[in-house]
Image (cartoon, helix red, strand yellow):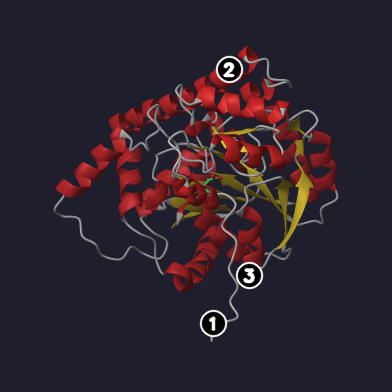
Amino acid sequence: VFDHVVQAPEDPILGVTVAYNKDPSPVKLNLGVGAYRTEEGKPLVLNVVRRAEQLLVNDRSRVKEYLPIVGLAEFNKLSAKLMFGADSPAIQVKRVTTVQCLSGTGSLRVGAEFLARHHHQRTIYIPQPTWGNHGKIFTLAGLSVKTYRYYDPATRGLNFQGLLEDLSLAPSGAIVLLHACAHNPTGVDPTLQQWEQIRQLIRLKGLLPFFDSAYQGFASGSLDADAQSVRMFVADGGECLAAQSYAKNMGLYGERVGALSIVCKTADVASRVESQVKLVIRPMFSNPPIHGASIVAIILKNRDMYNEWTVELKAMADRIISMRQQLFDALRARGTPGDWNHILKQIGMFTFTGLNTAQVAFMTKEYHVYMTSDGRISMAGLSSKTVPHLADAIHAAVTR
Ligand code: LMR
C-alpha cells in the first residue's frame, strides 16, 4: 500500500548534518545547524544544567507522573517572567497565559493551531527570508502564509522601508511573525527606534504580532536587552504571542523545552484562551515532558544558579562574537575580495555570508565545509582552529 510513496528531500537545515556525518574527511566542518560548540568543536552541557540535573536525581520525592496539559506550572510562571520582565504589569494582572511546549517549534505550532481556530484573520506574514521551518509550521496549522520584505542583499542589512510598506498593506488582523532578536538566518535586527516604528504600525493597522524568541541572551549576552522588542509590544497594553525556546540559551536542544505565551487584553480573556489552548495540546502531544522543564525551573528560581547561567550564557555569546572578529580578520589577511563588515555587524548565532548556492556547493565539495545553501553559517560551530580553513574556503569560492 505504500509503493507510491516517493523519497522526501532531506530537511534544508538538519539535512546538512546528515550529509556532514557521511563525509569521512578529517577536515570537515559543520556550520549548518545552529548548535553551540566549544573551542574544541564539542557540544556543551552548561555546568549549571549539570548541577540542576544532579539536584533532580538526588530528590527522591520527584516522581514521573504526567504533567498537566499546560505543563509545569512553576516553569510557565518563570518563563513568562524571563520573557516579559520580572515585574511585568501584564503578568501581575494575569493577562498572560503561558503553556509549556516542545521547544520553539512546538510553541509556534501550538500558537498557530490556536490562531487557525480562533483568530478571525488566518493570514500570517513571515519575513523574507526566515527560518526554513516557519512557513511549513504555519501552513500545516492551516494559516495562509505571505512574506514581508526584511533583508536587503545590497546592504546586507535591514530593508526597513520594504518592511514598513509590506506591513502597511497587510489586511487588518493579519498575524506578523517577528524574530524577537538575532534574526535567523540573517543576523540582522531592527534598531530599538525601528522596533518602535514597527510597533506603531502594527498597532495602527490592528495586526497581531507573533514573536519567535529562540535566542534570548545570545544576541547581546543580556537576557533583558534581547527581550526588549517583545516587551515594547506588551507595555502598550496590546495583544501578542511569544514562542520561547531554551534550546540555545540553556543548551537544552534535545530536551525540547519551550513555552508559548499569549498576551491578552484581560485576565478573563487569558483564562478562556488557555482553556482553548489545552484543547489544541491534548490531541497533539497530550502533555509535555517533565525533565527539561524541571531543569529550567530549578535554574530560574534559584538566584545563585540563575547568575551562574547568565555567566555561562555570556561566555557562549562572547565566544561567538570573537569568532566573528577572527573570521573577518582572516578574510582581510587573505585579501579576499568583497566587503566583509557584515560578519562583524550581524548578531546572534549566524552570519548570512552573501555566498550563493554555487559557492556553497563548491565549499562543501572542495573544502568539506557544510552550511545551508542560502549561505548561512553558524558562527557557534566555528573555533580558532577552524577559522583559517573556513577563510581559505570562502577565499577560494569568491576568487575562482
Ligand atoms: C537552526 O536554524 O539551525 C536551528 O534553529 C535548528 C533547527 O531546528 O533548524
Q: Position of residue 118 (x, y in %)?
A: 64, 67
Please name the residue that numbered disc 1 is placed on.
2
Q: For the residue marked with disc 2, what is the amino acid? A: Ala
Mark 1 Cβ and ligand 1 under 8 Å apart: no
How many marks overall?
A: 3
Please name the residue that numbered disc 2 is placed on.
330
Q: Quadrant of the C terminus?
A: top right
Identified at 54% across, 48% down, the residue is 16
- Can you tell which mark lies on residue 273? none
Q: Position of residue 371 (x, y in %)?
A: 58, 41
Cβ atoms under marks 3 and 2 closer than 8 Å: no
Identified at 64% across, 38% down, the residue is 362
Image quadrant where residue 236 sits: top right
Mark 2 Cβ and ligand 1 under 8 Å apart: no
Q: Is residue 150 left or right of residue 281?
A: right
Secondary structure state at the residue bearing disc 2: helix
Q: CA distance from mark 2 to mark 1?
A: 52 Å
* Whether residue 125 can be seen here: yes
Q: Please tell me how crowded label 1 is: few (under 14), some (14-19), or many (20+) other residues with Cα within 10 Å.
A: few
Q: For the residue marked with disc 3, what is the amino acid? A: Arg
Please name the residue that numbered disc 3 is placed on.
117
Please report whichever mark, 3 or 2, sits nearer to the chain's N-terminal start. 3
Q: Nearer the viewer, residue 390 or 379?
A: 390
Q: Position of residue 56 (x, y in %)?
A: 22, 48
